[in-house]
Image (cartoon, helix red, strand yellow):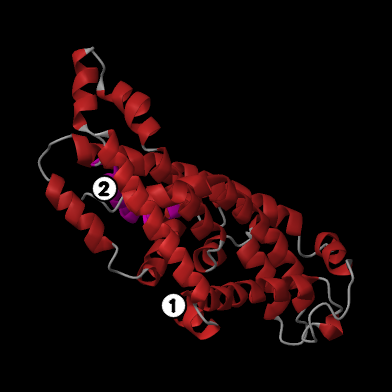
Amino acid sequence: MDKELSKEELKAYKAAKAQLTDERKLTFGGWLRKKGWKHLVGWVMVVYSIFPIVYVISGSFANADQFTSTLFSSFTTDNYVDLFNDPYRPFANWFVNTLFISGTAAIGSVFLSALAAYAFSRLRFTGRRAGLLTLILVQMFPQLLALVAIYALLVNIGNVFPFLGIGSQLALIMVYLGGALGANTYLMYGFFNTIPKELDEAAKIDGATHTQIFYGIILRLAAPILAVIGLLAFIGTSSDFVLANIILTKPESKTLAVGLYMYVSDQFGQRWTIFAAGAVLAAIPIVALFLYLQKYIVSGLTGGAVKG
């Protein structure tokens, strides 16, 4: 057995050495045809992706009259100072509002989607298949179709419960939770199906309830998909403009996406450099959250698509 193993190792070594020799003998044209074009495409995509970011950062430090000039043709921090000192545009409030609304909506979306996905994945009840099909069919309709209905509904609800009417951040959070429930539930349902049901059965034998199984086993094993759902929900709500612009009417209650638009909405008073500075600061929470959760992203997205 040892002799056969050594022969296999020797054969593998010779093959690797031969491949390395062939690669060294390649001309530049041969290397470019074999693997060089992959490096070229990769660098093109990197430059293509980074250029807009660099341009925005450059614009945030540029003077107002040099925004469209070459990159970093001027350097000033006045745009960031003016961003926080504008009495009519409370950027700090917008920043806090965005973190609160997006964070609450993300956490709530993850929790509600996990509850629904667990029920569809582990429980058997009448209307289960119809409910799953309905979740998918509802996603076919564009969100814009619901804007008029949402506005009218919130106006009527606000007449009875003012804290859930137009102008309320809580109302906006509730709308976000309802809109994201379908797709998130189905994605999480696919991931839950990959968790062996034998774990549930073993826990039931030990006397565990569905609640204990859900919190003690399923949620711990489903950490990747929970992170993905939370990240997508946070990004989607923090960058939403239409719903936030319709529901939030007071300047101090607006989010960053709506508030920053005020800097470029006036045809004769556009301030693109300050807008760029605000965009750079607005991207920091998303980038930080993405970097923190990146280890879960790949496994969460692929796991949710394995078994439906």
Residue under label 2, please give it.
190
On the question of residue 177 being in view, the answer is no
Q: Residues within 10 Å of mark 1 (few under 14, many from 20)?
A: few
Mark 2 or 1 closer to N-term? 1
Q: Is residue 260 left or right of residue 193?
A: right
Q: CA distance from mark 2 to mark 1?
A: 39 Å
Q: Which residue is mark 1?
A: 34
Q: Secondary structure at mark 1?
A: helix
Q: Is residue 236 visible?
A: yes
The disc at residue 69 is none
Please state the horizontal and vertical placement of residue 52, each as a whole percent of the image: 65, 75
In the image, is residue 110 part of the stretch drawn in magenta? no
In the rendered image, residue 129, in percent from the top left (x then y), is placed at 13, 49
Instruction: Classify residue 245 by image quadrant.
Output: bottom right
Q: Residue at x 71, y 72 (%)?
A: 54
Q: Label 2, secondary structure: give it.
A: helix
Give x and y (percent) for residue 86: 83, 64
Taking depth in this image into account, of 182 and 50 the one nearest to the observer is: 50
Task: In this rendered view, identify the residue nearer to me: 126 or 6.
Answer: 6
Q: How many marks?
A: 2
The magenta stretch is 176-193
**In terms of image quadrants, where is residue 151?**
bottom left
Instruction: Characterize the local packing of mark 2: few (<14), some (14-19) or many (20 or more) Cα atoms within 10 angstroms.
Output: many
